[in-house]
Amino acid sequence: MTWISYYMAIFTPAGSPPKDFEPAAGAVKRWCFKCNAYKPERTHHCKTCKTCVLKMDHHCPWTYNCVGYKNMPHFIRFLVWVDLTSGYGFYRLVLQCINLYKNRGLPAYLIPLSEILASVILTPITFFVVFSVGLLSIRVFLNMLNGITQIESWEEERLASAKRRNLIPRNTHFPYDIDLWYNINHTWGPMWSWFLPFGRPEGDGINFQKNESGFDDEGNPITWPPDQREVLKPDDAESGSDSNRTSGEMRGFGRGPVTFAQTYISSMQQRSLLSNRSRSNSTSSEESTGYPEWRDQITSDADFYKRELFETFEGEKISDFGVDLDSEMPRPAASSSRRYRPDAGEIQQELHLHQQDQHRAQQSKEEDDLPLAALMAKRKKEKAYVS
């Protein structure tokens, strides 16, 4: 069964959206610039397989295949059978090593040398397999019980870091976690098919039930992760269709994802406008801008919490799971006749950041000549001012 499950995990496609797929009316639209087609929710473009994968979990180097909606049950069965067989093999090897140790006083000709070498070599190898595959199995089963994929688990860790720094609302939750039994059936399949070679999950890999976190106050579906814009087909983006939809400030029309920095600054600017209506005089630059001055240093290219830049504690990036980020936002070619031209506000922001960089460089140069006591006093004063 181990080899059958392994074969099925290798040669069973993970599942791709239909070529004529069109999002339902009112649904969040996500255009893939590599496949030149709309893709359903929870679908990502694999940079190795060169196609969009339904409910993509990751690209597996063991099977050289994407793990997604259709072949996830085969991958789980493969892990289970490897855990059982390698675990039993390790148990027998440990017993053999104990037996060899007990018989260490016997003449050497009574114990074949091949038996000793096999026990010494295979025991650590089998332990490594049991340990590594066991950790992966625990990770996969925890994700399954929570109704989440490995890519979405990475996104959740990124969002959790952003929540702690108040970059996104703290009431942002994963919208696809329904209940334990539903999550298992839509990942591994019904109980009667768990260990059958051809068992498959419930659903179609395109439409997913959501909890209350997946809708806004008006009942309209919202994007997840919350910093991702809706990406329309280029023709639809140019015509401006669906431009009056709700949550429009979080959705773009072919211009790529919004960053946490832009989200934070936008929300703080709106709060500042409301505050300035009741207070005509501002006494500090922080009150006039609506957000701390150090926030000016975060731009779309230096936002640590962007999907392209964020790393987990283990050093994992989203590209490590096989996601092709270029499929979500086209890169302007040098020979293209329609090049992106920044507007006046973006140019002014870049000039402001350049001036800040020059000021910080000059300040750092001056601090090099200060005595340590004076430098510590200056740092303490700056910290008190910011707080």
Image: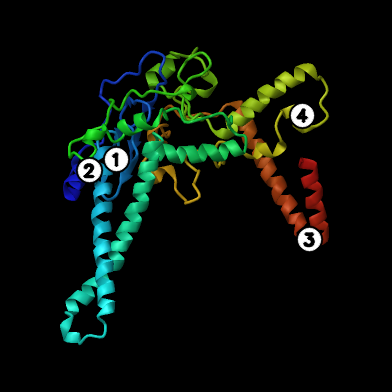
Q: Secondary structure at mark 1?
A: strand
| Residue drawn at (69%, 23%) of the image | 271
- Which circle marks residue 369 in the picture? 3
Q: Nearer the viewer, mark 3 or mark 4?
A: 4
* Amino acid at the residue labelled 3: Asp
Tell me the distance, in whole angstroms, between the alpha carbons under discs 3 and 4: 33 Å
Callout 4: helix, strand or loop? helix
Instruction: Measuring from the top left, give residue 263's x and y in whole percent.
Output: 58, 29
Q: Which mark identifies residue 287? A: 4
Q: Earlier in the sequence, mark 1 or mark 3?
A: 1
Q: Is residue 228 left or right of residue 40?
A: right
Task: Give above or below for 247 relative to 187.
Answer: above
For marks 2 and 4, give the CA distance. Answer: 58 Å
Q: Looking at the image, do the residues carrying marks 2 and 4 touch, with CB atoms under 8 Å apart? A: no
Q: Are marks 1 and 4 in contact (CB under 8 Å)?
A: no
Marks 1 and 4, how far apart at CA: 50 Å
Q: Amino acid at mark 4?
A: Glu
Q: Residue furthest bottom?
A: 107
Q: CA distance from mark 1 to mark 3?
A: 57 Å
Query: Nearer the viewer's eye, disc 1 or disc 4?
Result: 1
Q: Position of residue 300 (x, y in %)?
A: 55, 36
- Is the image coloured rainbow, by chain, by secondary structure, or in one colour? rainbow
Figure quadrant of the C terminus: top right
The reply, left or right, for residue 350 in relation to residue 247 is: right
Which residue is denoted by mark 2 in the rendering?
Answer: 9
Residue at point 51% right, 15% down? 246
Counting residues from the start of the chain, the first of labels 3 and 2 encountered is 2
Query: To which residue does mark 1 refer?
Result: 67
Local SS, label 2: helix
Taking 76 as reference, is 32 above or below it? above
